Image (cartoon, grey):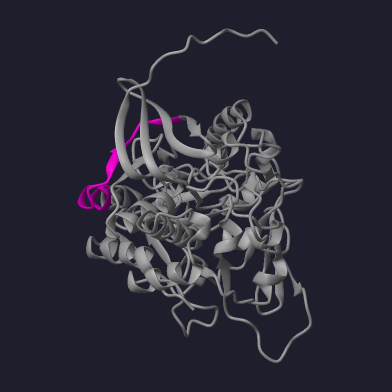
Amino acid sequence: MSSVKEPARDVPVINEVDLVVVGGGCTGVFAAVRAARLGLSVAIVEKQNCFGGVATAGNVNIWHTLHDTVGERRIIAGLTLEMLERLSARDALHTSSNPSSAFCFNTEELKIELDDLIVGHGIVPHLHSFYAGPVVDGGRLTAIIIEKKGGRGAIRAQQFIDATGDADLALDLDLPSFKPETLQPPTMCAKIQGLDSLGDFDWQQSISEHGAEFGLDPDSGWGCRIPGLADIQMRADTHVFNCDASEGNQLARAEIEGRRQVRAIMDLIRKYGPADADIALVDLAAVIGVRETKRIVAAYRLVGDDVLNGRQFKDAIANGSYHVDIHHADAPGRTYRYLDGTELIIPERGKEWIRRRWRDPIDMDPTFYQIPWSCLLQNRIPNLALAGRMLDADKTAFSAARVMVIMNQTGEAAGVACALAVKGGIPVQSVDPSAIRSSLTEGGSIVI
């Protein structure tokens, strides 16, 4: 392979802070806010034009329940609850008794609320800014390089958080990682107007019957209403199969194919639906919804039995009740596995759902599970914390823990850990998990 030589150059330092967070999804924002509330100076780097990640730029406007599986005990609070309360005050939130879609929000209002959090806490925002590489001295991170309008710059910090999702910073530091044998495929989400005008026409069944004509694989999907927008739905109706979204060329193919799939569905509806139907594409996600890429090897690997048996951990920093949700990589459909011992397999459109048990009934089913700090704790870099879906987990555990209301909590824990590390002058690995848990509780999180 041919190459070019990039000349060496001096990179100006554009910020010097206590903490820099790489990745501005809700996980990263909540990490930054937690640290700022504990007195740290913070900068945050995000490649999109807004904060929020999949919840905003990705159009995924659903957060799952903050209660246990039986709805009797709240197990999640903190900044997730705070944000939901802010959205509710703006009439930008719908609530539901369905735990899988307990909260549907207006993504555009969430963008502004996250801006307000960042600005209100004095956090230095870097939008349209691409993380480009680490600067390491003696095994310790001293800065990161970013590319943004105006050129290349460095941000120096005492502590760093990788909240990129794909573990971009951690992988550049050669932290041990693994990639599952199969990856859950990504989805291009869209906002579509006029589906109510289809009346009794079963457009999902029509996709099942005529999808091949429009280049659509057998598949299945879902959707959600949007507060304040009459007859506009967020739709997630397809997958881009055989894709590793952490590889640049494959990601580009997925984005283009995902958009094509959305148009194909609309063309199909226009051809086979009612003549007086009036549908329109309102918005395509700025980023495809990536579910799974590489993960970092940590001090502990969360496994399916931990989740499905509701194991509790002394170093737990997050709680969840969302079911195992595996989007099939090699066939259409999804497998849901619940803590009550039941399982639901949703095949391609038009085929019967399969309900069965994955284990025999027991006297008392668990009602929630926990995420330990140790499954985010790497031992190579003394001033790097991890947050989000790069956590060390097997396929089953990951498929429950990866959702936003759980990953948000890992961000808060990482922000607290970095604040304690700075104040104590110690490596992040030396921070006592009980101190993280205590600080989270004092900050409004529910720690069990």
Q: Residue 207, percent across and down? A: 63, 46
Residue 311 picture location, percent across and down = 64, 76
Task: State left or right for residue 241 relative to residue 370.
Answer: right
Residue 129 or residue 351, whichever sits in front = 129
Instruction: Identify whether 268 is placed above or below 67.
Output: above
Locate residue 32, reporting x and y percent. Answer: 35, 51
Span of residues in magenta: 115-131
Residue 193: tell me if it is visible.
no
Q: Quadrant of the N terminus?
A: top right
Please tell me which residue lies in front, 189 or 24.
24
Q: Is residue 403 left or right of residue 308?
A: left
Residue at 68% across, 40% down: 241
- Assess whether residue 122 is covered by the magenta stretch: yes
Quick check: 99 above or below 417? below
Count of marks, rendered view? 0
Q: Nearer the viewer, residue 10 or 126?
A: 10
Residue drawn at x 50%, y 68% is 433
Q: In the image, 182: left or right of 201?
A: right
**Furthest residue to the bottom?**
363
The picture places residue 322, in percent across and down from the top left corner, at 56, 68
Magenta span includes 166: no
Task: State the image quarter where residue 89 is shown.
Answer: bottom left
Residue 69 quadrant: bottom right
Q: Can see residue 149?
A: yes
Which residue is rendered at x = 64% and y = 39% of the image? 240
Could you tell me which residue is drawn at 45 percent across and 56 percent down? Answer: 414
**Above or below for 16 versus 67:** above
